Amino acid sequence: MSEEKAKGLNRRDVIKGLATLPVAGVFAYSWYQKQKIDRMLKNAISDEVNLETEQMAFSSKPNNSQQIRLGIIGAGGRGRSLLKAAGFAEPRFIDDWKWQASQKKTDKRYEEYMQQEDLNLVLNGICDIYEGNAEKALKAGANQYRNGVDGKMGAEPKRYRTYQELLAADDIDAVIIATPDHWHGTITIAAAKAGKHVYCEKPMTWTIPETYEVRKVVKENNIVFQLGHQNRQTESHYKAKQAYEKGLLGKVNLIEVTTNRNSPGGAWQYHIPEDAGPQNIDWNQFIGPAPWHDFSLERFFRWRCWWDYSTGLSGDLFTHEYDAMNQILSLGIPEAAIASGGVYFYKDGRTVPDVLQMTFEYPARDLSLLYSASLSSNKRRGKLIMGHDAYMEVGGNLKLYVDSGSTKYKDKIKEGIIDPKLPLYSFTPGMKQVDAITSPTEQYFAGRGLLYTYRGGKRVDTSHLHIKEWVDCIRSGKQPSCDIDQGFEEAMTAHMGTVSYHENRKVFWDATKEEIV
Amino acid sequence: MRYSNTQLFWLVGLRVIIGWHFLYEGLVKLINPNWSSVGFLLDSDGPLGDFFQSLATYPDLLHWIDLLNIWGLIAIGAGLMLGFLSRMALVAGIVLLSTYYLSHPPFIGLKYAMPTEGSYLLVNKILIETIALVVLLLFPTSHRIGIDRFIFTEKEA
């Protein structure tokens, strides 16, 4: 005994020292069993899903190509954020983002902007009919070095008083059009005729006749046209398209898209600058193709509230939803549309409705597209593509759930391999890699917007990617994702809804004559 | 410190099941290529919320935080389960759990995106597990039942 003690080890010691080892054995066995079941379930699902698992790379090419000379027509809020996306942010914003980042480390706007790819553009011309907008845009245009107010600036772009003068300039190759809706078509036509490439904000047109003209002129003049639906760059939409095309959803009969907002700004009651008035707004030019109305600050700054300048919910917000669905399902123009709604909350003199329902019929595809909007409720409803076998919720991320009544997945549901309560497939941009099953916690975070959208490890602005695609196409001669044909479909579909609303009747699309009847 | 057999049995039992929990939490993170602490850190709140959120903003640091979490959980778990370097494992476990608690303290008025499976007022399961580790630190067992018996024989003699 004493000898054994001297060695420091006896049988009792060994037993006691390793007494918990069997627990480790139980752990290892349980782990093995759990992994086996998980792997079996996962393989069974992966066989079903079979989607590409790689994420979109950031297609950054060195800009040794020729510099493209830009002009912008309409440099209000949206116009200036497009300038930022093109690489021309106002110096005051740079200072502000920098300050915000110093206050809160998670505020990445400064870093994100500084990392935004240089597209090798120069902004040579600005046209805006309100001095306040023009001044801000001139400063943005001069800020090619991405500095704050006290930093080094380049030459200011030239200020044009009319779009015709800007389009006549020799030192402009391409224009961004971000005017109110009633000018989109007219200016796009003039720009195409002048041989300038066009990036036009949505919706493509304000009236039906100009829609044909825009398409004709853009095609005749061989310009590169991109409609401003930046959703075309959203990764989850590509994944949704793949899932749909692989038939994971089964037969899709109903799509539901929505708009929900609940704030004065969301309902287009924008701020009216104190210094604004007839002395610094070219009112006659604002009116343009619209019916005459005496000068009104409200109408100038909140033009989206009046049919005289706006396309209402259908053109302004439904088009975002429609274009996403057209991107995913290649819907095209519907055969019929019916709309209803009214001015129910914002009784501020506006003529466009703040509540709108529209149904678009695609009998050849056996499906209906339903749109429902309210500007006085924030209830988030998202985009739902409903198939017999599964449904998809599409947003920044993507979730695909099997339907409990599915025929295709019936056996797997029965065997317990597929649980209709859990997503069969989910995709969260920015995750290290895509997998058929991700944890509920990750999905929860993603759903709450706590994870950012990345491309190639960098957080990027979709508008920047959309402008980049346009610019790349100008250089390569290819067609961008939201080209003139997609734009034509978008405009006509939105117009069908609007005509139905105005005329209080069901309207139809005559595909042979290409007419709304 | 002398324990009765029953006391020793339950103290070792507590050590082993906490070890099990740590080990499993570490291993599931290890085999999930998508796992990252970024969501948890960004969801932080309370007096140290800004600090924990700021950790998530440095990709290089985040990489180390992820590795430290995964291997820390595994090492602590195995240590507690087998009674190997238990003292070190207990201290590390207390530190790690404290950061989890402090980043998501269930204080009155704070809300998290992180789903929880129970209802908590100041005290949550992380705090209970932390205190259980403190108790185990004060009532050591690994020098009797555990690999530490082979390492620290002289001390207990």
Image (cartoon, coloured by chain):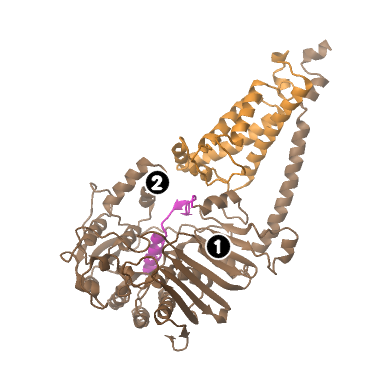
Chain colours: A brown, B orange
User: Residue A134: x and y, percent?
Assistant: 22, 62
| In-image side of B102 versus A125 (left or right) | right
Say what amino acid the circle numbered 1 marks. Answer: Glu
In-front residue for pair B14/A302: A302
Question: In the current view of this chain or complex, which residue is farthest to the right?
Answer: A1
Instruction: Give the quadrant of residue A463.
Output: bottom left
In-front residue for pair A262/B29: A262
Q: Is residue A84 above or below residue A170?
A: above
Question: In the current view of this chain or complex, which residue is farthest to the bottom?
Answer: A513
Instruction: Give the quadrant of residue A193.
Output: bottom left
| In-image side of A84 versus B19 (left or right) | left
User: Residue A305: x and y, percent?
Assistant: 33, 69
In the picture, the disc for residue A393 is 1
Q: CA distance from mark 2 to mark 1?
A: 28 Å
| In-image side of A465 versus B110 (left or right) | left
In the picture, the disc for residue A359 is none
Span highlighted in magenta in the image: A449-478
Are discs 2 and 1 located on one and the same chain?
A: yes
The chain letter for the residue carrying disc 1 is A
Is residue A507 found inside the magenta-colored segment of the image? no
Instruction: Specify the quadrant that holds the C terminus of chain A.
Output: bottom left
In the picture, the disc for residue A107 is 2
